[in-house]
Amino acid sequence: MQKRLIWFALRVPRGELRPKSFSLHKTRDGTAFGFVAAALGQLGYTLGPAIFNFPESPIALPGWLCRGDLILMTTRPPLDRDKHKKLIETSGSTLEHAIFVRLHECFTHCSRSRVTVSDRAASILRKQKKEEWASARFEVNAGASLVQNNRAPNSAPSQLGYLVYVPALWKGGPRFLAIFGIGGTETLLWSYLLSTKYRKVLSAALAKRETSLVIGRFQTVLSPYTTPADLAFADKYVVQFADCAFI
């Protein structure tokens, strides 16, 4: 069976669009997708058509999707909205609805400022002694670091990254993979780590027969006000993982 990789692309904020322009290239987190696509290529996946999940996109399900396809989303899924302006637009399409239904099996809340996992996932995290990951709050105005009340002075901020794998969005349907951090930079770092240093974690998730949620925690030394020359600094990051699988 051919294994095609399908990018589920979301659009940049409206403020970055030109009026009346044809802007298919104005998508979020393309570099993160590139890293993951390269890693999946090593696992036998070939690139297929991208799906543009824009507000004006068609509602109907793409007729060419098949069982061997893997739909990849490299942007935080906008399951819930905050009051601030950091909005990710949705399309209301049939495919988006199917994806969000499966993501709600893993999350009871997912927004820019807060992520709370489902009760089943929280129970598994407690057994792994990582119950504090079950409900996490994040900075909004200065990066997207994890809010920690007991953080030591001058210590590096922590991030959480999320991976969700669904073996079939519906019976006989395509598979689904979401890899995301809370903000764009966090998504880029998390995607890079899973595609390089921690590729075995990505491979193990794709081998599972049940819906799986993987959470990773890592400290960053990158300031939101600095621009490094490359991503080599991330090779030194050490990630703690928690794996939640649902039968």
Image (cartoon, grey):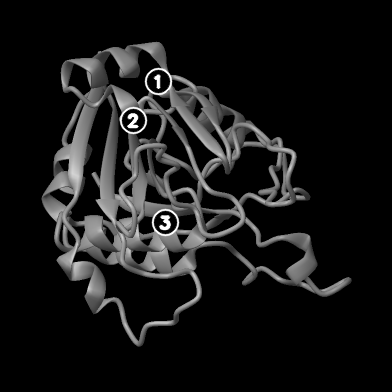
For residue 10, the mark is none
Q: Residue 201: x, y in percent?
A: 16, 45
Quarter of the image with the C terminus is top left
Residue 2 visible: no
- The residue located at (53%, 35%) in the rendering is 114
Q: Which residue is mark 1?
A: 171
Residue occupied by mark 2: 133
Cα–Cα gap, marks 2 and 1: 31 Å
Nearest to N terminus: mark 3 or mark 1: 1
Q: CA distance from mark 3 to mark 1?
A: 30 Å
Check the image and report above or below for 212 versus 229: above
Q: Quadrant of residue 194?
A: bottom left
Relative to 158, is 107 on the left or the right? right
Residue at the spot 70% in from the left edge and 47% down from the top edge: 89
Please identify, in this view, whether the residue under mark 2 or under mark 3 is nearer the observer: 2
Q: Residues within 10 Å of mark 1 (few under 14, many from 20)?
A: few
User: Seen in the image, is 199 located left or right of residue 52?
Assistant: left
Nearer-N-terminus badge (2/1): 2
Q: Which amino acid, by three-letter code, is at mark 2?
A: Trp
Kind of residue at badge 1: Lys
Secondary structure category for the residue under label 2: helix
N-term-proximal mark, 2 vs 3 = 2
**Mark 2 to mark 3 CA distance (whole Å):** 17 Å
Q: 104 above or below 92?
A: above
- Place of residue 140 in the rendered image (x, y in percent of width and height, measured from the top left): 59, 50
Residue on which disc 3 sits: 187
